[in-house]
């Protein structure tokens, strides 16, 4: 089972990114679950979401304490949350950043998801929406196929700017 933990802030699309990722994995013929964990938070508060992907049915629905991958949609979350906590040896990190970052021996990738969202005008209430661009980056990293990523995005959104953002992130991710 491949387990992913997504760290974001309320309103950035982290919860929807988890749902999109699970849907894309299902389109790839896998089993997948997505679940958010938050209380009475408001826009801007730290949020964590979880995705599990496997070749067989998934019967675990708890929080992910030892992920294979961590996704950080807002680097400022790292000021209040230890995003690397429990990351398995050999784990991977994907961060929303225009610049490479080191994560203590973990394999990492980066892509400017915010810049891509702003370029495509994917903004709600003044905040860039990062859910569809990050799905493109994950496709490039081999977590899901590019075809399934686009199919999942089109199932959830009719605005083709979302597909353009995913395609841009696919091209621009550095790992």
Image (cartoon, grey):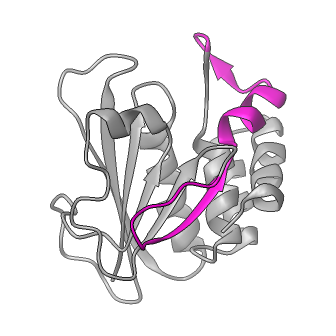
x, y (%) of residue 77?
37, 35
x, y (%) of residue 151?
71, 60
Q: Is residue 97 visible?
A: yes
Give the camera-side residue of 43 and 34: 43
In which quadrant will I find the N terminus?
bottom left
Q: Is residue 107 magenta?
A: yes
x, y (%) of residue 64?
22, 63
Give the residue displayed 42% in from the left and 32% down from the top. 76
Give the residue displayed 62% in from the left and 51% down from the top. 134
Seen in the picture, residue 38 relative to 34 is either above or below; the reply is above
x, y (%) of residue 99?
67, 48
View extreme (bottom): residue:
55
In which quadrant will I find the C terminus?
bottom right
Q: How many marks?
A: 0
Q: What are the residue bounds of the magenta stretch?
A: 100-126
Q: Is residue 155 visible?
A: no
Give the residue displayed 18% in from the left and 64% down from the top. 65
For residue 160, side relative to residue 153 (left or right): right
View extreme (top): residue:
125
Seen in the picture, residue 99 relative to 56 is either above or below; the reply is above
Seen in the picture, residue 26 relative to 15 is either above or below; the reply is below
Seen in the picture, residue 67 relative to 155 is either above or below; the reply is below
Give the residue displayed 64% in from the left and 72% down from the top. 141
């Amino acid at each position: 089972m491949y387990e992913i933990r997504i760290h974001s802030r309320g309103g950035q699309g982290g919860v929807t990114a988890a749902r999109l990722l699970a849907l894309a994995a299902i389109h790839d013929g896998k089993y997948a679950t997505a679940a958010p964990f938050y209380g009475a938070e408001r826009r801007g508060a730290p949020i964590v979401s979880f995705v599990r992907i496997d070749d067989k049915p998934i019967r675990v629905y708890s929080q992910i304490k030892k992920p294979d991958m961590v996704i950080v949609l807002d680097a400022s979350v790292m000021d209040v949350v230890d995003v690397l906590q429990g990351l398995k040896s050999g784990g991977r990190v994907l961060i929303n950043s225009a610049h490479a970052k080191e994560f203590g021996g973990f394999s990492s990738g980066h892509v400017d998801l915010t810049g891509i969202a702003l370029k495509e005008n994917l903004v709600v209430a003044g905040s860039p929406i990062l859910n569809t661009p990050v799905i493109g980056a994950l496709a490039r990293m081999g977590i899901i196929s590019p075809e399934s990523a686009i199919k999942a995005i089109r199932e959830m959104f009719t605005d083709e700017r979302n597909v353009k953002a995913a395609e841009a992130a696919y091209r621009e991710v550095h790992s």
